[in-house]
Image: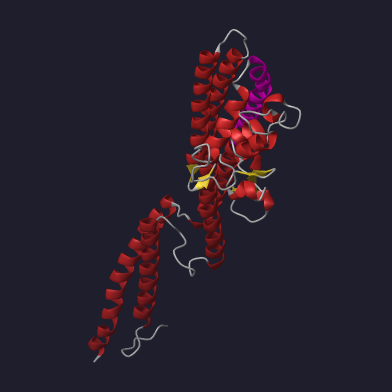
Amino acid sequence: MASLTVNTNIASLVSQRNLSKATGGMNTAMERLTTGYKINSGKDDAAGSAVSTLMEAQISGYDVAESNATMGLSLLDTAEGVLDIVSGYLQRVRDLTEQAANGTYGTSSMRAIRTEVEQRMLEINRLCEVIDFNGINLLDGTSIAVTSQKGLNLQVSNNAGESNIINLNYTLFESAKCSALLVTNNAHAGEGNTWYTRTNENETTDAIKARITGTNVGGYDYSDKYPALDANNYADKTLACITAICDAVYTDDNTAREFLYFIDDAIENVSNRTSLIGAYMNRVESAVDAISVQKENIVSANSSIKDADVATEASNYIKYQILQQSSATLLSTANQQPSIALNLI
């Protein structure tokens, strides 16, 4: 039989405990409904909170990797656009050279052809010098990707290691200037080619080579001609190279005809780069797709750990709200219970 006491009200203590529990449950449900998360602090689920934090770091990393890949696509697209222009200019130079290879053109006509060719070459050089992406020179051969011969790395995953990068071969960023396409990296350049080795305008073979490459050959030093003018009023090595080529080629139909081999090599060089860029773009796009799938899976897993079930929490909120109200009502009744003792006095 329960005792009727004044100093200790057990019913009130039980009601207070249940009221506190109901209030805490209602507050928790309210917090989860307002934040959308069932884990809002470590006390909610210590292990789940740790796992979710790691997953969120991965999700953030995938966002950065996706941005990196997109930047890489933009870089490749920029280089491809300029190479398309260079290819068009080279095709025009080839057409003009094929015209010059026909013996029906006199001195004035050959001079006109030479003038247009020179301007086309100068524009090719200008484009290669000015095109850059975020400060990286793409086609003048001076970027670290070329000088180190290590290429350019795209970080397309959120982890370390070579398996998480796509390396763009350094040949993509080699110089596409006329000196590189028509001389330095040209398969036909070398001894035994008439236009390249001929004596022209009282210059020896070494002098022509020095002007074309902008170096010191056989005592003819053109390595320091930028920006000062040289004896022939060539403003810089770029102009010296183009002038030397045009002087040696567009003099008669034989040298022009031979030069077609060099232009074809240059066009092939640009075409190969464009094809390689296309292959890399497909690969990077595939990496972007893979990143999206991986990110989606991680987000889904993190959601199952951290996100609140709104239906469940709404039900809990109503349940604890009812329990809170009933506990408050019963607490009021329990607090009145000791006053019954007055009837016995």
289 sits left or right of 313 in the view: right
136 sits left or right of 270 in the view: left
Q: Nearer the viewer, residue 11 or 218?
A: 218
- What is the x, y in percent for residue 145? 61, 48
Q: What residue sits 73% from the left and 32% below the top?
A: 190
Q: Give the range drawn in magenta.
A: 253-281
Q: What residue sits 54% from the left and 42% below the top?
A: 72
Residue 21 appears in the picture as rendered: yes
- Give the position of the C terminus as an image quadrant: bottom left
Characterize the magenta stretch by its predominant secondary structure. helix
Q: Nearer the viewer, residue 24 or 135?
A: 135
- What is the x, y in percent for residue 93? 56, 21
Q: What residue sits 69% from the left and 28% below the top?
A: 198
313 sits left or right of 164 in the view: left
- Give the position of the N terminus as an image quadrant: bottom left
- What is the x, y in percent for residue 225? 54, 45
